[in-house]
Amino acid sequence: MFDIGFSELLIIAVVALIVLGPERLPKAARFAGLWVRRARAQWHSVKDELERDLAAEELKRNLQDTQSLMRKADQDLRTESERLRRDFERMPDAAADRSDDAAPPSPTRDDDAIR
């Protein structure tokens, strides 16, 4: 977070010791530690909430994509089903048209004559 090295921390500690004195320095250090812990906890809370919101948005987006794919697949299936139903309904008509166009050959008894 902050780029503070050991030398900077040592300088801050020496200045705090001089300004606050040895009797108030431990209380001040505990108080500063308390605020740092609270700030970190708050930061982690906000970070976790943002991650949950992002995950929820991603899930929502995935759900919408899946729903749109399912709708498209359903529509494709319905369209294909309707086409197949129409083709199936036309099959008897097509068979009747073929039978009318081509008369079946008359049976001959050539097989009986050969015997």
Image (spheres, helix red, strand yellow):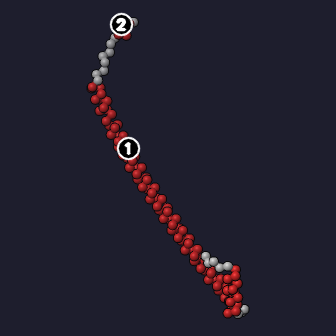
Q: Secondary structure at mark 2?
A: helix
Residue, far left: 100
* Label drawn at residue 80: 1
Residue 110 lies left or right of residue 18; in this view the side is left
Would you say 17 lies left or right of 87 here? right
Compare marks 1 and 2 and give the one earlier in the sequence. Answer: 1
Label drawn at residue 64: none
Query: How many C-alpha atoms fall within 10 Å of the one at disc 2: few (<14), some, or many (≥20)?
Result: few
Whether residue 67 sits left or right of residue 86 in the image: it is right
Which amino acid type is marked by label 2?
Answer: Ala
Residue type, numbered disc 1: Glu
Above-or-below relation of 47 to 61: below
| Image location (x, y in percent) of residue 108 | 32, 13
Position in image of residue 115 (x %, y %): 39, 6
Q: Give coordinates of residue 22: x percent, y percent.
A: 72, 92
Q: Is residue 8 above or below residue 24?
A: above
Task: Residue under label 2, please give it.
Answer: 113
Q: Is residue 41 above or below residue 71?
A: below
The residue depicted at 62 percent of the width and 83 percent of the height is 35
| Residue 28 seen anywhere in this rendered image of the structure | yes
Please give left or right for residue 45 compared with residue 67 in the image: right
The x and y percentages for residue 100 are 27, 26
What residue do we see at 55% from left, 74% from top?
46
Front residue of 36 and 85: 36
